[in-house]
């Protein structure tokens, strides 16, 4: 993943996530412990990540090369503070995974493309609420016009399951400790909430079936959980892309199982998250069907 020149809707000057403000328990002996080292590494990482303009996550496209490289290095440093087995998705780790998470940095193509939205639109906060008991999660993102002319959102609905131990990701990483999930995207919902300052009462909504490379080739997307505590999660996509998230309640309620079951495509067009802002082309043979 390359770190390049900042473009688009970049971060508010000087604003940081301030990881040093997260609560940290002091060791009883007063001497540094492994836990102290983990908390210090976590604070260094969060202190290095700017708050994106409008609350959006920052990326290797919105940051300069030096800032991006520092975040990537600090993420690897934080990952190294815990045994990889601690991220195996069972027991305590699975409980910690449950809940709402806010994306604050990523270099994945499906995120970086959103920093160059057309027609004066900019990305806002991005959340990932996970409901472990349902094997279900959503990726929700708000989008706003820089002049306040419109406001909308996208909601990606997906299911996940534990990946088989021993499988190898596209980046060549072996799932040897059981910290990998397989992801199956079901629907993408686009909603226009306000237009020229007036509420739309969510009457302008499109539901489409995702059709990226994974859907067309049958290769199931994967995600490795490489660091997980009660405040911060670091994950790696199957292609090696980096995601850093902070636990924070999402302002949007997740869909209920009944609401998910009622989602049906409203257009024949399909959506490729790595390339499209909106559904862009008609479905080909075998596309346009949810799984």
Image (cartoon, rainbow, N blue to C red):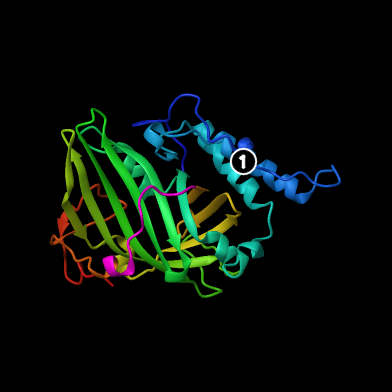
Task: Residue at the far top: name it.
Answer: 13
Q: Is residue 207 left or right of residue 134?
A: left
Residue identifier under label 1: 22
Residue sitting at x 22%, y 49%: 191
Q: Is residue 154 magenta?
A: no
Question: Image quadrant of residue 18?
Answer: top right
Circle count: 1
Residue 241 visible in this rendered orientation of the protein: no
Label 1 neighbour load within 10 Å: few <14, some 14-19, many 20+? few
Q: Nearer the viewer, residue 193 or 233?
A: 193
In the rendered image, residue 187, in percent from the top left (x then y), is placed at 27, 62
160 above or below 106? below
Query: In the picture, which quadrant includes the C terminus?
Result: bottom left
Left or right side of 291 for 129: right
Please name the residue shown 76% across and 50% down the image. 34
Predominant secondary structure, magenta span = loop
Look at the image and say whether residue 252 sits in the magenta stretch. Answer: yes
Q: Nearer the viewer, residue 160 or 217?
A: 160
**Residues in magenta, as a range:** 248-259
Residue 154 is left or right of residue 219, and the answer is: left
């Amino acid at each position: 993943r390359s770190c390049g020149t900042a473009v688009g809707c970049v971060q508010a000057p000087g604003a940081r996530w301030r990881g040093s403000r997260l609560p940290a328990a002091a060791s009883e002996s007063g001497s540094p412990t492994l836990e102290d080292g983990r908390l210090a590494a976590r604070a260094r990482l969060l202190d290095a990540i700017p708050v994106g303009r409008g609350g959006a996550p920052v990326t290797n496209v919105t940051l300069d090369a030096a800032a991006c490289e520092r975040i990537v290095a600090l993420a690897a440093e934080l990952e190294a503070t815990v045994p990889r087995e601690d991220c195996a998705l069972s027991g305590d780790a699975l409980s910690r995974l449950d809940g709402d998470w806010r994306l604050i940095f990523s270099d994945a193509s499906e995120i970086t493309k959103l920093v160059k939205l057309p027609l004066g639109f900019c990305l806002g906060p991005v959340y990932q609420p996970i409901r472990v008991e349902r094997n279900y999660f959503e990726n929700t993102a708000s989008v706003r016009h820089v002049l306040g002319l419109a406001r909308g959102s996208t909601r990606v609905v997906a299911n996940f399951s534990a990946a088989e131990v021993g499988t190898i990701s596209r980046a060549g990483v072996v799932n040897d400790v059981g910290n990998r999930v397989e992801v199956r995207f079901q629907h993408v919902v686009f909603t226009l909430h306000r237009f020229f300052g007036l509420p739309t009462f969510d009457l302008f909504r499109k539901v489409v079936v995702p059709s990226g490379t994974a859907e067309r080739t049958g290769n199931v997307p994967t995600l490795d959980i490489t660091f997980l505590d009660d405040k911060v999660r670091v994950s790696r996509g199957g292609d090696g892309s980096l995601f850093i998230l902070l636990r924070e309640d999402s302002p949007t309620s997740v869909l209920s199982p009944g609401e998910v079951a009622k989602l049906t495509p409203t257009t024949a067009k399909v959506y490729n998250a790595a390339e499209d802002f909106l559904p862009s082309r008609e479905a080909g043979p075998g596309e346009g069907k949810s799984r």
